[in-house]
Image: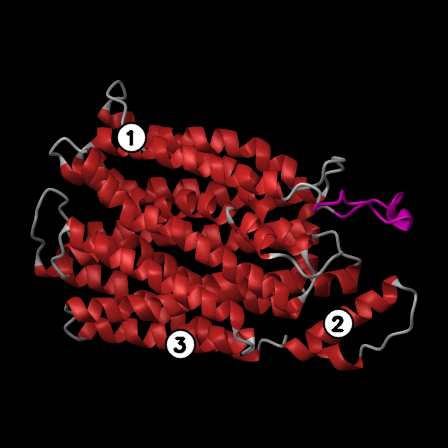
Amino acid sequence: MNNKLSLGAKTGYGMGMIGECLAMNTFYIYFLFFLTNAVGINAGVAGTVAMIATFWGAFTDLIAGTRTDNSTNPKGRRRPFIFKAAIPLGIVTFLMYTDWSIVPDGAKPVYFTIAAMIFWLALSFTDIPYVSFGSEITDDYDERTSIRGISNIINYAGMILASSGTLTVVAMLSKDGGVGDTAAWSKLGLIFGILTLAAYWIVVGTSKGREKPYVRPAEDANVKQPGYFKTCLEVIKIKPYRHILIYTICAYGGVLLFTSMYIYYLSYNVGMTEGQSATVMLVYCFMVMGVSAIYGKIRIEKKNIVIGATMICGIALCAGKFLPVGTVGVYVLFFLFALAISAYFVQIYSMVYDVCDIDEFKSGGGRDGVIVSLFYFIGKFIGGIAMAAVGWILEFSKYDAASLEQTPQTLSGIASGALLLPGILMIIGALVMVKYPVNSKNFNALRGAIDARHEGKEYSTEDFEELLK
């Protein structure tokens, strides 16, 4: 394998992040808001709809990981899935943001639950093979970080559309109905569906010839392969992987809680208009693009970046709950959040790829899809809880979507859900990573041993024993 990739190859792979971002982030940021403020569904019910669909998506991630790992398609294990699954993904993105008049109000929660479940199914079979493909393009420690850095920059080019662009496009397409115009949301879904399909197809087109079909080792040909859940239990035994999963439960849970809640916080607690909120998100996206570019270039240990960025952001969010936050304060909070979220998408994803190499040394490999899909499963499962929590917090706080001004109880509940709870979770996540054992020195020693074994040479595990515990 050619470990060094051209900028064009990295960019072509990274284009898939636009599809992932438009699909996933629009859901996490605006789906709940769309259901409560446009369709008119009760906040608690809307949160439950989002939770059910996201939980379902967590399980479909597991299925997608297994299917792609076991694929014997001569065209490759990942690219054929990306190409085919992107089609229904584009279609259902439109359907999920369309409020059909023929659907009775009482049946709308059912309709949107089904649409969202199909959405997550299609996204699983598009995005899991896409992310897994990233571990197969190169096995170089620094190149993987570079790929994630470029991918994250492109991701936030898509994030401009998903966050700032969503409100702007809805306002442009609206017939004086603002964010409550369901026809404008439907048109938005159509546009984003087409762009999502195109982004994933670009990955398929630009990566032709870079993926080789997986060939099971001859000695394993007649050996019965373990079931999926047994395989999951085996990879969870990898110590660095456990750190990543626990971090995801805590810190990424905080990220998703903030992501699903901040639109309410900006609108009601800070009193920003739709245009001002869109501007905040636009600036935030450029912040993340800049930070991601830096993360992809600097040679500070991944672990240290994750701990520092997550801890600082967590402390700042907690402080924001008790201190007055004006316009300047909002931009400061979003800058610190940009540091943390970039660390997650650049460093943590790269760490997951490193786990694939540890697994290759310990078990022979071939389980990248399981490792990635289980990582995604945890993220989706926590995402479902976070979105449900937002709905429940809003309902408990007596949120009224029809009211331009909310009660002090509601504002306090929104601030707790947007700042305090995410901050606490991020602080816990940062502490979890303190004992993360992988660094550039022991990982490079591991890669050297893998290469030596492939070449039939002798090798020693002395320099990376901690990774094998």
Give the structural element (helix, strand or loop) at label 2: helix
**Residue at position x 75%, y 78% in the image:** 465
Point out the tag, 1 or 3, that comes first from the N-terminus: 1
Q: What is the magenta range?
A: 210-226
As displayed, is residue 2 above or below residue 300? above
Q: Nearer the viewer, residue 91 or 61?
A: 91
Q: Using a 10 Å C-alpha cutoff, classify the residue at mark 2 as few (fewer than 14 neighbours), some (14 to 19) or many (20 or more).
A: many
Q: Amino acid at mark 2?
A: Leu
Q: Amino acid at mark 3?
A: Met
Q: Which residue is mark 1?
A: 186
Quadrant the C terminus occupies? bottom right
Give the structural element (helix, strand or loop) at label 3: helix
As displayed, is residue 149 above or below residue 445? above
Give the structural element (helix, strand or loop) at label 1: helix
**Residue at position x 37%, y 37% in the image:** 192
Q: Using a 10 Å C-alpha cutoff, classify the residue at mark 1 as few (fewer than 14 neighbours), some (14 to 19) or many (20 or more).
A: many
The secondary structure that dominates the magenta segment is: loop
Q: Which residue is mark 2?
A: 446
Let me know if residue 466 appears in the view: yes
* Cβ atoms at labels 2 and 1 below 8 Å apart: no
Separation of residues labelled 1 and 3 (CA atoms): 39 Å
Q: Residue furthest bottom?
A: 462
Position of 183 compared to 451: left or right?
Answer: left
Q: Amino acid at mark 1?
A: Ser
Point out the tag, 3 or 2, that comes first from the N-terminus: 3
Q: Give me the disc on residue 311.
A: 3
Q: Where residue 340 sits in the image (x, y, percent)?
A: 40, 68
